[in-house]
């Protein structure tokens, strides 16, 4: 007879005598269930703990790598937005530059300058132009002035140009740059 059956028989005998105790009999677990419970040696426990720590560290490392990748992606996106804004500003400034170049070209046009001079300023073209030849460069400053004074009256006279016929020849001397 098994120990569980013996315990049952004893409880039934007591119940028949009228001495019933308060609880159900303590259940005995079968031996197969008890077999999986055993003492674990310290070395095996350390190996298991090391494995858990290694796996946890690997997962934490992987999480850090993913966090770094997300951060890098955010930085790239921010820089791309900034680059797009700078490109838009550059194209707007390029358009402004081209408009200003066109305005300068229109303002420098000989016909506009002549019409502005003759219109509101009341200037008019001379009937004749006297050209004064430059004195030789080897002369002293006082002799240059004397030569220039003598040359004023003795210079050749020619008719004034009409409109902007001689403008390409004259413009480099007026603007300071050819």
Image (tube, rainbow, N blue to C red):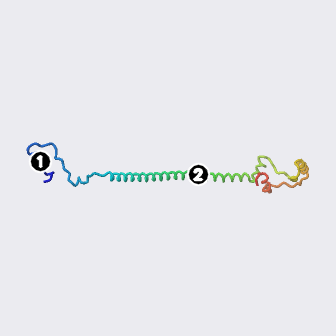
Q: Secondary structure at mark 2?
A: helix
71 relative position to 142: left or right: left
Q: Position of residue 21 (x, y in %)?
A: 14, 43
The residue identified by callout 2 is 86
Residue 58, x across and y down, in percent: 41, 53
Mark closer to the observer (2, 1): 1
Q: Which residue is mark 1?
A: 10
Tags 2 and 1 in contact by the CB under 8 Å rule? no
Q: Image check: 100 left or right of 156? A: left
Image quarter of the N terminus: bottom left
Residue 56 position in % (x across, y down): 39, 51
Q: From the image, which quarter does the C terminus lie in?
A: bottom right
Q: Measuring 76% from the left and 49% from the top, which residue is drawn there?
A: 116
Dot 2 or dot 1: first in sequence order is: 1
Q: Nearer the viewer, residue 135 or 165?
A: 135
SS type, badge 1? helix
- For the question of whether residue 35 can be seen, the reply is yes
**Above or below for 137 versus 23:** below
């Amino acid at each position: 007879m098994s120990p569980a059956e013996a315990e049952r028989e004893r409880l039934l005998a007591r119940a028949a005598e009228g001495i019933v105790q308060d609880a159900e009999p303590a259940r005995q677990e079968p031996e197969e269930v008890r077999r999986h419970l055993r003492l674990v040696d310290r070395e095996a426990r350390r190996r298991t703990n090391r494995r858990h720590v290694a796996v946890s560290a690997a997962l934490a490392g992987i999480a850090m790598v993913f966090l770094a990748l997300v951060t890098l992606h955010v930085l790239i996106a921010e820089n791309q937005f900034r680059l797009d804004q700078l490109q838009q500003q550059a194209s707007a400034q390029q358009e402004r530059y081209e408009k200003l170049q066109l305005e300068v070209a229109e303002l420098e046009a000989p016909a506009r300058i002549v019409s502005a001079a003759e219109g509101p300023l009341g200037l008019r073209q001379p009937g004749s132009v006297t050209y004064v030849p430059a004195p030789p460069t080897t002369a002293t400053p006082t002799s240059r002035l004397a030569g220039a004074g003598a040359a004023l009256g003795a210079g050749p006279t020619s008719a004034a140009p009409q409109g902007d016929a001689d403008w390409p020849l004259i413009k480099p001397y007026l603007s300071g740059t050819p």
